[in-house]
Image: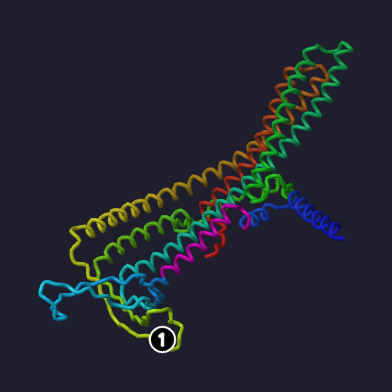
Amino acid sequence: MKRIFFFLIIAIISTSGFSQQHQKYKFTLEQAINFALDSNYTAINARRDIAIAIKKKWETTASGLPQIDANISYQNNLKLPTTLLPGEIVGGEPGTFVPVTFGTKENASIGATLTQLIFDGSYLVGLQAAKTFLEYSGNAEEKTQLEVRKGVINAYGSVLLSEELVAIFELNKANLEKNLIETKAIYENGFTEEESVEQLEITLLNIETQLKNSRRTLVIAKQMFNLALGVDVESEVELLDNLNTLTQENIDLSFLEENINIEDNIDYKIATNFTEQKLLELKLEKSYSIPNLAAFINYGTQANSETFTFFSKDQVWYQSSILGISMNIPIISSGLRSARTQQAKIALDQAETNLTRTYQQVLLDINTAKNNYQFAIENYNDNKKNLELSERIEKKNQVKFTEGLATSFDLRLAQIQLYTAQKNYFEAMLRVITTKAELETVLNTPQLKTTN
Protein backbone atom coordinates (compact mmCIF):
# COMPACT_ATOMS: atom_id res chain seq x y z
CA MET A 1 0.00 0.00 0.00
CA LYS A 2 2.84 2.39 0.86
CA ARG A 3 4.53 1.63 -2.45
CA ILE A 4 1.31 2.37 -4.37
CA PHE A 5 0.92 5.67 -2.49
CA PHE A 6 4.55 6.57 -3.22
CA PHE A 7 4.20 5.93 -6.96
CA LEU A 8 0.93 7.87 -7.02
CA ILE A 9 2.67 10.92 -5.52
CA ILE A 10 5.48 10.65 -8.08
CA ALA A 11 2.93 10.44 -10.89
CA ILE A 12 1.11 13.54 -9.66
CA ILE A 13 4.33 15.53 -9.38
CA SER A 14 5.47 14.40 -12.82
CA THR A 15 2.13 15.27 -14.40
CA SER A 16 2.16 18.67 -12.72
CA GLY A 17 5.67 19.42 -13.96
CA PHE A 18 4.76 18.26 -17.47
CA SER A 19 1.67 20.46 -17.62
CA GLN A 20 3.62 23.49 -16.44
CA GLN A 21 6.38 22.86 -18.92
CA HIS A 22 3.86 22.72 -21.80
CA GLN A 23 1.53 25.47 -20.65
CA LYS A 24 -0.35 27.18 -23.46
CA TYR A 25 -1.33 30.85 -23.68
CA LYS A 26 -3.70 32.91 -25.80
CA PHE A 27 -3.34 36.69 -25.98
CA THR A 28 -4.68 39.72 -27.74
CA LEU A 29 -2.07 42.46 -27.85
CA GLU A 30 -3.64 44.29 -24.92
CA GLN A 31 -3.80 41.08 -22.88
CA ALA A 32 -0.16 40.36 -23.69
CA ILE A 33 0.87 43.83 -22.48
CA ASN A 34 -1.02 43.46 -19.19
CA PHE A 35 0.44 39.99 -18.66
CA ALA A 36 3.99 41.19 -19.32
CA LEU A 37 3.67 44.14 -16.92
CA ASP A 38 3.24 41.56 -14.16
CA SER A 39 5.44 38.72 -15.40
CA ASN A 40 8.27 40.27 -17.40
CA TYR A 41 11.58 39.65 -15.61
CA THR A 42 12.68 43.28 -15.77
CA ALA A 43 9.29 44.48 -14.50
CA ILE A 44 9.48 42.10 -11.54
CA ASN A 45 12.86 43.47 -10.50
CA ALA A 46 11.62 47.04 -10.96
CA ARG A 47 8.90 46.35 -8.37
CA ARG A 48 11.56 44.95 -6.07
CA ASP A 49 13.50 48.19 -6.47
CA ILE A 50 10.40 50.04 -5.26
CA ALA A 51 10.21 47.75 -2.22
CA ILE A 52 13.88 48.46 -1.48
CA ALA A 53 13.27 52.21 -1.78
CA ILE A 54 10.36 52.02 0.68
CA LYS A 55 12.51 50.13 3.19
CA LYS A 56 15.35 52.60 2.62
CA LYS A 57 13.03 55.48 3.41
CA TRP A 58 11.99 53.85 6.68
CA GLU A 59 15.63 53.07 7.50
CA THR A 60 16.46 56.77 7.21
CA THR A 61 13.41 57.79 9.25
CA ALA A 62 14.12 55.26 11.99
CA SER A 63 17.67 56.51 12.48
CA GLY A 64 16.24 59.69 14.07
CA LEU A 65 13.81 57.88 16.35
CA PRO A 66 14.65 56.66 19.89
CA GLN A 67 17.25 53.91 19.96
CA ILE A 68 17.61 51.49 22.88
CA ASP A 69 20.61 49.23 23.30
CA ALA A 70 21.11 46.74 26.10
CA ASN A 71 24.22 44.92 27.22
CA ILE A 72 24.94 42.04 29.53
CA SER A 73 28.45 41.15 30.56
CA TYR A 74 30.07 38.50 32.76
CA GLN A 75 33.74 38.35 33.76
CA ASN A 76 35.68 35.63 35.50
CA ASN A 77 39.02 36.98 36.65
CA LEU A 78 41.10 33.82 36.50
CA LYS A 79 43.88 35.75 38.18
CA LEU A 80 43.27 39.19 39.65
CA PRO A 81 45.77 41.87 38.61
CA THR A 82 48.28 43.02 41.23
CA THR A 83 48.83 46.68 42.04
CA LEU A 84 51.94 48.01 43.83
CA LEU A 85 51.26 50.59 46.55
CA PRO A 86 53.94 52.71 48.24
CA GLY A 87 55.18 51.08 51.47
CA GLU A 88 54.63 54.29 53.48
CA ILE A 89 50.85 53.68 53.30
CA VAL A 90 51.17 50.67 55.64
CA GLY A 91 54.05 52.06 57.68
CA GLY A 92 56.84 50.58 55.60
CA GLU A 93 60.14 52.06 54.58
CA PRO A 94 60.11 54.81 51.93
CA GLY A 95 60.97 53.47 48.50
CA THR A 96 59.39 50.08 49.16
CA PHE A 97 56.16 48.77 47.65
CA VAL A 98 53.38 46.53 48.88
CA PRO A 99 51.65 44.21 46.33
CA VAL A 100 47.86 44.42 46.62
CA THR A 101 44.98 42.85 44.59
CA PHE A 102 41.64 44.62 44.20
CA GLY A 103 38.20 43.32 43.19
CA THR A 104 36.37 40.01 43.23
CA LYS A 105 36.96 36.99 41.11
CA GLU A 106 33.60 37.18 39.28
CA ASN A 107 31.67 40.24 38.07
CA ALA A 108 28.39 40.68 36.21
CA SER A 109 26.63 43.75 34.87
CA ILE A 110 23.41 44.58 33.06
CA GLY A 111 22.73 47.92 31.41
CA ALA A 112 20.56 49.71 28.87
CA THR A 113 21.00 53.03 27.06
CA LEU A 114 18.35 55.09 25.35
CA THR A 115 19.56 57.69 22.83
CA GLN A 116 17.50 60.30 21.04
CA LEU A 117 18.63 62.57 18.24
CA ILE A 118 17.50 66.11 19.01
CA PHE A 119 18.91 67.99 16.03
CA ASP A 120 21.11 66.93 13.12
CA GLY A 121 21.07 68.72 9.78
CA SER A 122 22.26 65.65 7.94
CA TYR A 123 19.28 63.69 9.28
CA LEU A 124 16.82 66.22 7.87
CA VAL A 125 18.56 66.11 4.51
CA GLY A 126 18.51 62.31 4.70
CA LEU A 127 14.74 62.31 5.06
CA GLN A 128 14.41 64.47 1.96
CA ALA A 129 16.85 62.25 0.08
CA ALA A 130 14.89 59.12 1.01
CA LYS A 131 11.74 60.68 -0.42
CA THR A 132 13.56 61.67 -3.61
CA PHE A 133 15.00 58.18 -3.94
CA LEU A 134 11.51 56.72 -3.63
CA GLU A 135 10.26 59.06 -6.37
CA TYR A 136 13.23 58.09 -8.55
CA SER A 137 12.51 54.38 -8.04
CA GLY A 138 8.88 54.97 -9.00
CA ASN A 139 9.93 56.79 -12.16
CA ALA A 140 12.44 54.05 -12.96
CA GLU A 141 9.66 51.47 -12.63
CA GLU A 142 7.43 53.56 -14.89
CA LYS A 143 10.21 53.71 -17.51
CA THR A 144 10.62 49.95 -17.23
CA GLN A 145 6.89 49.46 -17.79
CA LEU A 146 6.95 51.72 -20.83
CA GLU A 147 9.90 49.80 -22.26
CA VAL A 148 8.22 46.47 -21.48
CA ARG A 149 5.04 47.65 -23.22
CA LYS A 150 6.99 48.79 -26.28
CA GLY A 151 8.98 45.55 -26.31
CA VAL A 152 5.81 43.42 -26.19
CA ILE A 153 4.22 45.42 -29.03
CA ASN A 154 7.33 45.03 -31.18
CA ALA A 155 7.65 41.32 -30.40
CA TYR A 156 3.93 40.68 -30.96
CA GLY A 157 4.09 42.46 -34.32
CA SER A 158 7.23 40.56 -35.30
CA VAL A 159 5.50 37.24 -34.73
CA LEU A 160 2.51 38.35 -36.81
CA LEU A 161 4.84 39.55 -39.57
CA SER A 162 6.70 36.24 -39.59
CA GLU A 163 3.41 34.33 -39.74
CA GLU A 164 2.21 36.47 -42.67
CA LEU A 165 5.47 35.95 -44.54
CA VAL A 166 5.35 32.19 -44.02
CA ALA A 167 1.75 32.11 -45.25
CA ILE A 168 2.41 34.23 -48.34
CA PHE A 169 5.57 32.28 -49.25
CA GLU A 170 3.65 29.01 -48.91
CA LEU A 171 0.92 30.39 -51.18
CA ASN A 172 3.47 31.64 -53.72
CA LYS A 173 5.26 28.30 -53.60
CA ALA A 174 2.02 26.43 -54.28
CA ASN A 175 1.19 28.72 -57.22
CA LEU A 176 4.69 28.36 -58.64
CA GLU A 177 4.60 24.58 -58.36
CA LYS A 178 1.31 24.58 -60.25
CA ASN A 179 2.76 26.88 -62.92
CA LEU A 180 5.85 24.71 -63.19
CA ILE A 181 3.81 21.55 -63.71
CA GLU A 182 1.73 23.24 -66.42
CA THR A 183 4.81 24.73 -68.11
CA LYS A 184 6.62 21.38 -68.09
CA ALA A 185 3.61 19.82 -69.79
CA ILE A 186 3.58 22.56 -72.43
CA TYR A 187 7.34 22.14 -72.93
CA GLU A 188 7.03 18.36 -73.32
CA ASN A 189 4.43 18.96 -76.01
CA GLY A 190 6.84 21.30 -77.79
CA PHE A 191 4.89 24.54 -77.34
CA THR A 192 7.48 26.42 -75.26
CA GLU A 193 11.22 26.55 -74.71
CA GLU A 194 13.14 24.80 -71.95
CA GLU A 195 14.20 28.21 -70.64
CA SER A 196 10.60 28.83 -69.54
CA VAL A 197 10.80 25.79 -67.27
CA GLU A 198 14.23 26.80 -65.98
CA GLN A 199 13.11 30.35 -65.20
CA LEU A 200 10.23 29.01 -63.09
CA GLU A 201 12.57 26.54 -61.37
CA ILE A 202 14.90 29.41 -60.42
CA THR A 203 12.00 31.42 -59.01
CA LEU A 204 10.64 28.41 -57.12
CA LEU A 205 14.07 27.65 -55.65
CA ASN A 206 14.34 31.23 -54.39
CA ILE A 207 10.84 31.08 -52.84
CA GLU A 208 11.63 27.77 -51.11
CA THR A 209 14.79 29.28 -49.59
CA GLN A 210 12.88 32.32 -48.32
CA LEU A 211 10.14 30.08 -46.96
CA LYS A 212 12.63 28.00 -44.97
CA ASN A 213 14.25 31.13 -43.59
CA SER A 214 10.85 32.62 -42.69
CA ARG A 215 9.90 29.47 -40.77
CA ARG A 216 13.13 29.64 -38.77
CA THR A 217 12.60 33.36 -38.19
CA LEU A 218 9.07 32.64 -36.93
CA VAL A 219 10.44 30.25 -34.30
CA ILE A 220 12.93 32.87 -33.08
CA ALA A 221 10.25 35.61 -33.12
CA LYS A 222 7.97 33.48 -30.95
CA GLN A 223 10.76 32.80 -28.48
CA MET A 224 11.60 36.50 -28.30
CA PHE A 225 7.93 37.25 -27.67
CA ASN A 226 7.84 34.67 -24.86
CA LEU A 227 10.91 36.27 -23.32
CA ALA A 228 9.20 39.68 -23.46
CA LEU A 229 6.17 38.15 -21.72
CA GLY A 230 8.27 36.52 -19.02
CA VAL A 231 7.31 32.92 -19.80
CA ASP A 232 9.33 29.89 -20.85
CA VAL A 233 10.65 30.45 -24.39
CA GLU A 234 9.41 26.95 -25.33
CA SER A 235 5.82 27.68 -24.25
CA GLU A 236 3.12 27.67 -26.89
CA VAL A 237 1.50 31.08 -27.33
CA GLU A 238 -1.39 31.82 -29.70
CA LEU A 239 -1.86 35.39 -30.92
CA LEU A 240 -5.51 36.39 -31.25
CA ASP A 241 -4.97 39.65 -33.17
CA ASN A 242 -3.86 39.84 -36.79
CA LEU A 243 -1.43 42.20 -38.47
CA ASN A 244 -3.98 43.99 -40.64
CA THR A 245 -6.36 44.71 -37.72
CA LEU A 246 -3.58 46.06 -35.53
CA THR A 247 -2.31 48.24 -38.35
CA GLN A 248 -5.73 49.82 -38.90
CA GLU A 249 -6.13 50.38 -35.15
CA ASN A 250 -2.77 52.16 -35.01
CA ILE A 251 -3.35 54.52 -37.92
CA ASP A 252 -4.43 57.73 -36.22
CA LEU A 253 -3.11 60.99 -37.67
CA SER A 254 -4.90 62.97 -34.96
CA PHE A 255 -2.43 61.44 -32.54
CA LEU A 256 0.21 63.64 -34.15
CA GLU A 257 -1.62 66.67 -32.73
CA GLU A 258 -1.12 65.40 -29.17
CA ASN A 259 -0.04 68.22 -26.88
CA ILE A 260 3.65 68.09 -26.05
CA ASN A 261 4.32 68.20 -22.31
CA ILE A 262 8.01 67.61 -21.76
CA GLU A 263 7.51 67.29 -18.00
CA ASP A 264 5.49 64.09 -18.56
CA ASN A 265 8.36 62.38 -20.35
CA ILE A 266 9.88 59.74 -18.12
CA ASP A 267 13.49 60.54 -19.06
CA TYR A 268 12.91 64.17 -18.09
CA LYS A 269 11.37 63.06 -14.79
CA ILE A 270 14.41 60.92 -14.02
CA ALA A 271 16.78 63.76 -14.94
CA THR A 272 14.79 65.98 -12.56
CA ASN A 273 15.20 63.38 -9.80
CA PHE A 274 18.93 63.30 -10.45
CA THR A 275 19.14 67.10 -10.17
CA GLU A 276 17.20 67.02 -6.89
CA GLN A 277 19.59 64.36 -5.62
CA LYS A 278 22.62 66.58 -6.35
CA LEU A 279 20.92 69.51 -4.63
CA LEU A 280 20.39 67.37 -1.53
CA GLU A 281 24.02 66.23 -1.64
CA LEU A 282 25.03 69.91 -1.55
CA LYS A 283 22.72 70.50 1.41
CA LEU A 284 24.22 67.47 3.13
CA GLU A 285 27.76 68.79 2.80
CA LYS A 286 26.65 72.15 4.19
CA SER A 287 24.90 70.44 7.11
CA TYR A 288 28.21 69.03 8.34
CA SER A 289 29.15 72.58 9.39
CA ILE A 290 26.15 72.80 11.74
CA PRO A 291 26.32 71.48 15.34
CA ASN A 292 24.26 68.39 16.12
CA LEU A 293 22.60 67.63 19.43
CA ALA A 294 21.65 64.30 21.04
CA ALA A 295 20.41 63.14 24.44
CA PHE A 296 20.90 59.85 26.22
CA ILE A 297 19.90 58.09 29.41
CA ASN A 298 21.67 55.05 30.80
CA TYR A 299 20.64 52.63 33.51
CA GLY A 300 22.78 49.79 34.78
CA THR A 301 23.34 47.40 37.63
CA GLN A 302 26.44 45.49 38.68
CA ALA A 303 27.21 42.58 41.00
CA ASN A 304 30.49 41.17 42.35
CA SER A 305 31.23 37.83 43.95
CA GLU A 306 34.01 35.35 44.63
CA THR A 307 31.78 32.57 43.24
CA PHE A 308 28.98 32.44 40.66
CA THR A 309 26.03 33.53 42.82
CA PHE A 310 24.41 36.02 40.42
CA PHE A 311 21.11 34.15 40.32
CA SER A 312 20.92 33.93 44.10
CA LYS A 313 18.26 36.07 45.79
CA ASP A 314 20.86 37.15 48.33
CA GLN A 315 23.15 38.56 45.66
CA VAL A 316 23.60 42.31 46.01
CA TRP A 317 23.29 44.39 42.84
CA TYR A 318 24.55 47.97 42.76
CA GLN A 319 22.58 50.26 40.50
CA SER A 320 23.66 53.33 38.52
CA SER A 321 22.01 55.74 36.09
CA ILE A 322 23.18 58.62 33.86
CA LEU A 323 21.28 61.30 31.98
CA GLY A 324 23.19 63.43 29.51
CA ILE A 325 23.17 65.67 26.44
CA SER A 326 25.96 65.81 23.92
CA MET A 327 26.67 68.41 21.27
CA ASN A 328 29.17 68.07 18.48
CA ILE A 329 30.42 71.45 17.22
CA PRO A 330 32.47 71.51 13.99
CA ILE A 331 35.13 74.22 14.22
CA ILE A 332 38.09 73.80 11.87
CA SER A 333 38.45 71.20 9.13
CA SER A 334 41.40 72.83 7.33
CA GLY A 335 39.30 73.30 4.19
CA LEU A 336 38.07 69.68 4.05
CA ARG A 337 34.36 70.56 4.36
CA SER A 338 34.75 73.49 2.00
CA ALA A 339 36.32 71.30 -0.68
CA ARG A 340 33.53 68.74 -0.39
CA THR A 341 30.89 71.46 -0.57
CA GLN A 342 32.46 72.93 -3.70
CA GLN A 343 32.55 69.48 -5.32
CA ALA A 344 28.85 69.04 -4.56
CA LYS A 345 28.13 72.48 -6.02
CA ILE A 346 29.93 71.60 -9.26
CA ALA A 347 28.05 68.28 -9.43
CA LEU A 348 24.76 70.19 -9.04
CA ASP A 349 25.74 72.53 -11.89
CA GLN A 350 26.46 69.48 -14.06
CA ALA A 351 23.08 67.98 -13.20
CA GLU A 352 21.27 71.21 -14.07
CA THR A 353 23.09 71.37 -17.40
CA ASN A 354 22.16 67.74 -18.05
CA LEU A 355 18.52 68.55 -17.21
CA THR A 356 18.52 71.33 -19.81
CA ARG A 357 20.08 68.98 -22.36
CA THR A 358 17.50 66.30 -21.52
CA TYR A 359 14.69 68.78 -22.14
CA GLN A 360 16.05 69.53 -25.62
CA GLN A 361 16.74 65.84 -26.30
CA VAL A 362 13.19 64.86 -25.34
CA LEU A 363 11.80 67.59 -27.59
CA LEU A 364 13.93 66.23 -30.44
CA ASP A 365 12.86 62.64 -29.67
CA ILE A 366 9.19 63.63 -29.78
CA ASN A 367 9.57 65.41 -33.12
CA THR A 368 11.58 62.50 -34.53
CA ALA A 369 9.02 59.94 -33.32
CA LYS A 370 6.18 61.95 -34.84
CA ASN A 371 8.03 62.21 -38.15
CA ASN A 372 8.79 58.47 -38.18
CA TYR A 373 5.16 57.64 -37.38
CA GLN A 374 3.80 59.89 -40.13
CA PHE A 375 6.31 58.47 -42.60
CA ALA A 376 5.33 54.92 -41.59
CA ILE A 377 1.67 55.66 -42.38
CA GLU A 378 2.54 57.23 -45.73
CA ASN A 379 4.89 54.34 -46.53
CA TYR A 380 2.14 51.85 -45.66
CA ASN A 381 -0.33 53.54 -48.00
CA ASP A 382 2.27 53.61 -50.79
CA ASN A 383 3.13 49.94 -50.34
CA LYS A 384 -0.54 49.01 -50.29
CA LYS A 385 -0.98 50.66 -53.70
CA ASN A 386 2.25 49.08 -54.96
CA LEU A 387 1.00 45.64 -53.94
CA GLU A 388 -2.27 46.13 -55.79
CA LEU A 389 -0.38 47.23 -58.92
CA SER A 390 2.12 44.38 -58.64
CA GLU A 391 -0.70 41.83 -58.33
CA ARG A 392 -2.38 43.16 -61.48
CA ILE A 393 0.92 43.21 -63.39
CA GLU A 394 1.75 39.63 -62.34
CA LYS A 395 -1.70 38.38 -63.36
CA LYS A 396 -1.42 40.05 -66.76
CA ASN A 397 2.02 38.54 -67.34
CA GLN A 398 0.71 35.16 -66.23
CA VAL A 399 -2.04 35.31 -68.83
CA LYS A 400 0.34 36.59 -71.51
CA PHE A 401 2.83 33.82 -70.71
CA THR A 402 0.14 31.17 -70.96
CA GLU A 403 -0.97 32.55 -74.31
CA GLY A 404 2.61 32.82 -75.52
CA LEU A 405 2.60 36.60 -75.64
CA ALA A 406 5.24 37.07 -72.90
CA THR A 407 8.54 35.37 -72.19
CA SER A 408 9.33 33.43 -69.05
CA PHE A 409 11.82 36.16 -68.19
CA ASP A 410 9.04 38.77 -68.26
CA LEU A 411 6.91 36.55 -66.02
CA ARG A 412 9.77 36.04 -63.58
CA LEU A 413 10.38 39.79 -63.31
CA ALA A 414 6.68 40.34 -62.60
CA GLN A 415 6.71 37.58 -59.97
CA ILE A 416 9.81 38.92 -58.23
CA GLN A 417 8.25 42.39 -58.25
CA LEU A 418 5.09 40.95 -56.65
CA TYR A 419 6.99 39.02 -53.99
CA THR A 420 9.01 42.10 -53.10
CA ALA A 421 5.85 44.20 -52.91
CA GLN A 422 4.22 41.62 -50.63
CA LYS A 423 7.20 41.62 -48.27
CA ASN A 424 7.41 45.43 -48.25
CA TYR A 425 3.67 45.69 -47.57
CA PHE A 426 3.77 43.46 -44.51
CA GLU A 427 6.91 45.15 -43.19
CA ALA A 428 5.22 48.55 -43.66
CA MET A 429 2.28 47.32 -41.57
CA LEU A 430 4.63 46.34 -38.76
CA ARG A 431 6.43 49.69 -39.02
CA VAL A 432 3.15 51.54 -38.41
CA ILE A 433 2.63 49.55 -35.21
CA THR A 434 6.18 49.92 -33.90
CA THR A 435 6.55 53.63 -34.67
CA LYS A 436 3.22 54.30 -32.96
CA ALA A 437 4.52 52.41 -29.90
CA GLU A 438 7.74 54.47 -29.96
CA LEU A 439 5.77 57.73 -30.11
CA GLU A 440 3.52 56.61 -27.25
CA THR A 441 6.60 55.76 -25.20
CA VAL A 442 8.17 59.18 -25.74
CA LEU A 443 4.89 60.91 -24.90
CA ASN A 444 4.32 58.55 -21.94
CA THR A 445 0.89 57.69 -23.38
CA PRO A 446 -0.91 55.82 -22.01
CA GLN A 447 0.44 56.56 -18.53
CA LEU A 448 0.95 53.27 -16.73
CA LYS A 449 0.30 52.63 -13.04
CA THR A 450 3.27 52.19 -10.74
CA THR A 451 3.42 50.59 -7.32
CA ASN A 452 4.75 53.57 -5.37
Name the quadrant containing residue 427: top right
Task: Work out whether 175 lies above or below 305.
Answer: above
Task: Work out whether 199 lies above or below 140.
Answer: above
Per the picture, the main secondary structure of the magenta-coloured stretch is helix
Position of residue 15 in the picture relative to residue 66 (left or right): right
Q: Report the magenta residues as a range.
A: 38-60
The total number of labels drawn is 1
The answer to whether residue 12 is visible is: yes
Label 1: element kind: loop
Where is residue 235? Give x, y as percent.
72, 47
Residue at figure coordinates x 67%, y 30% from the top left: 420
In front of the other: 364 or 316: 316
Residue at figure coordinates x 37%, y 81% from the top left: 305
Residue at figure coordinates x 84%, y 60% from the top left: 2
Disc 1 marks which residue?
315
Task: Work out whether 201 lies above or below 435.
Answer: above
The answer to whether residue 111 is visible is: no
In front of the other: 438 or 45: 45
In front of the other: 317 or 146: 317
Badge 1 local density, few (<14 within 10 Å), some, or many (20+)?
few
Query: Residue lying farthest bottom?
Result: 314
Quarter of the picture containing the N terminus is bottom right
